[in-house]
Image (tube, rainbow, N blue to C red):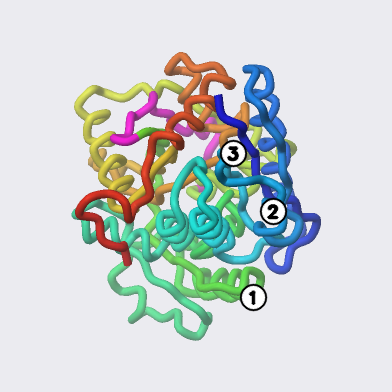
Amino acid sequence: MPQVLVLYSQTDHLIKGQPHDIVAEQSTVLCAHAVAQALDSAGWPVVAVPITGDVETALAPYSPAEWVVFNLGEGLSGRLFEEARIAWALEVMGYCFTGADAPALALTSHKARAKALFARAGLLTPRWRLFTHPGQVSEHELEDLSFPVIVKPVAENGSLGIGDDAVAHSIAEVASRVERLVGLYRQAALVEEFIGNREVNVAMWGDPPVVLPLSEMIWEAAGAPGERVVSFACKWDADSRVYQNTSVTCPAQIAPGLKQAITEAAVGAWHAIGARGYGRVDIRLDQDERPFILETNCNPDISADGGFYRSAREAGYSYTDMVLHIVRIAMEQTNSYDRPGNAMRP
């Protein structure tokens, strides 16, 4: 029975984005306390440690020889790629920690690089372009993409930057959204073909990965394509129409053959990223029911009302069981450079 240190980021302001984005940041704090409570209820020694400055200072009192880190660190104030930097620091300092390693977290955060890896692995992913300025948006640059398209920040999670108008139907709309996102989030905008049919979430954990029951998003009153998107409002704004008219079915009602195709695609994406620990792969089905990889989420939200726990619960795990299992996976896994034949990923 190890001593577990629940590490999480605690921030009260953002250096980019929109004011309401702080809701997503603060949800991590609630999740950390839920994880700590679950460990305590099982009789495991546990302490919750916030990162309010740098991770090295936060962990200084805790020896890596005595503590396993339940890593929920995402960085402060919305800074880019600090989640990967925290994982690097944990590894270098010698901690055993839950979830993905730094290279996988960096790829998870950079949606375009991840999509390039999916394509290289022979997996279907919506065609895309990156823009850093609205002046780059032109008919020529978009000629290989079919409208409608969806425009979102290239390196955010939690649906940050995905508004009700994220789906664009013209070059002018794309340029307008690119200008807004680049200005607000200080990063490139990812423009990808929008596949407006079914969306399936595939949760998995372990090595080799064990796939948990699939979940499907249900947009009960969707009209326009923009309402068939997991937008910021859909995810976080309980008063919004799209939040109130969106539900999730788990297990998803999917024919066996299609379920196998979705599962194989998700596991392929997991391996392409080099994921470990636990994660979730988001998939859209086109009109021919072909699975397209949207993204792989390493260290996804594991709140009691989140999607990952929904799948774990359907598989027979209580919340406490899920938390303990994630810790046990961490104690059994090795670093990527310790695995025979592994080279550093790009």
Residue visible at 23% across and 23% down? 256
| Alpha-carbon span between mark 2 and mark 1 | 37 Å
Q: Earlier in the sequence, mark 2 or mark 1?
A: 2
| Secondary structure of residue under mark 3 | loop
- Tell me the kind of residue under disc 2: Ala
Dot 3 or dot 2, earlier in sequence: 2
> In the rendering, which numbered label is found on residue 183?
1
Do the numbered discs 1 and 3 sit on residues whose CB atoms are within 8 Å?
A: no
Taking the image as shown, residue 231 lies to the left or right of residue 192, namely right
- Return the disc, 1 or 3, that comes first in the chain's sequence: 3
The span picked out in magenta is: 207-224
Q: Which residue is mark 2?
A: 60
Residue 20 at least partly seen:
no
Closer to the observer: label 1 or label 3? 3
Crowd band around label 3 with a 10 angstrom C-alpha radius: few (<14), some (14–19), many (20+)? few
Quarter the N terminus occupies: top right
Relative side of 149 to 207, left or right: right
Q: Amino acid at mark 1?
A: Gly
Q: Dot 1 lies on which element?
A: helix
319 is within the stretch colored magenta? no
Question: Which residue, given by chain and number where applicable, does mark 3 sit on?
Answer: 66
**Which residue does the image show at 41% across and 81% down from the upper left?**
138
Write down the quadrant of residue 345 in the picture. bottom left
Amino acid type shown at disc 3? Glu
